[in-house]
Image: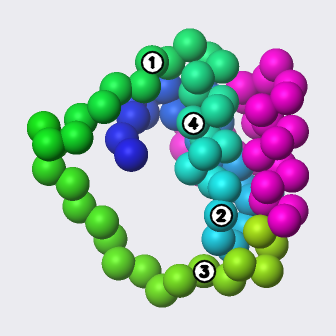
Amino acid sequence: MAYWREDALKINGYNEAITGWGSEDHEFVVRMLKLGIRKQFLKMTAIVFHIYHKPFSKSNRHKNELIKKASSENNHYYIKDGMDKYVQS
């Protein structure tokens, strides 16, 4: 997945309430779509790199799913626990 920095700042990046494995990308995309950012498909047209990392724990998967569901059901795209504590817009 790729996105413009300015767009990520508008939604305050990934929701850091989501921990371990699961739902972080989907929840991020839900909020981008609420902001009005269009999804584009680049299959077979872009070079993709994946950075290897050890698998994360799935013990918080249910909690993460609930956070994703709440993001899907409300009208907000900006989250309070995100990247604003690390970067300035």
The magenta segment: 62-89
Element type at marker 1? Answer: loop
Q: CA distance from mark 1 to mark 3?
A: 29 Å
Q: Is residue 88 magenta?
A: yes
From this viewpoint, which residue is outermost toward the top?
A: 36
Element type at marker 3? Answer: loop
Q: Which residue is mark 2?
A: 22
Q: Amino acid at mark 3?
A: Phe
Q: Callout 1 environment at 10 Å: few (<14), some (14 to 19), or many (20+)?
A: few
Q: CA distance from mark 1 to mark 2?
A: 23 Å
Labelled disc at residue 65: none
Q: Which residue is mark 4?
A: 29
Quadrant housing residue 33: top right
For the residue pair 69 and 3, the one nearer the viewer reads as 69
Mark 1 or mark 3, which has the lower sequence index? Answer: 1
Q: Amino acid at mark 4?
A: Val
Q: Amino acid at mark 2?
A: Gly
Q: Is residue 82 magenta?
A: yes
Q: Position of residue 24 (x, y in %)?
A: 63, 54
Q: Which residue is mark 3?
A: 56
Q: Amino acid at mark 1?
A: Arg
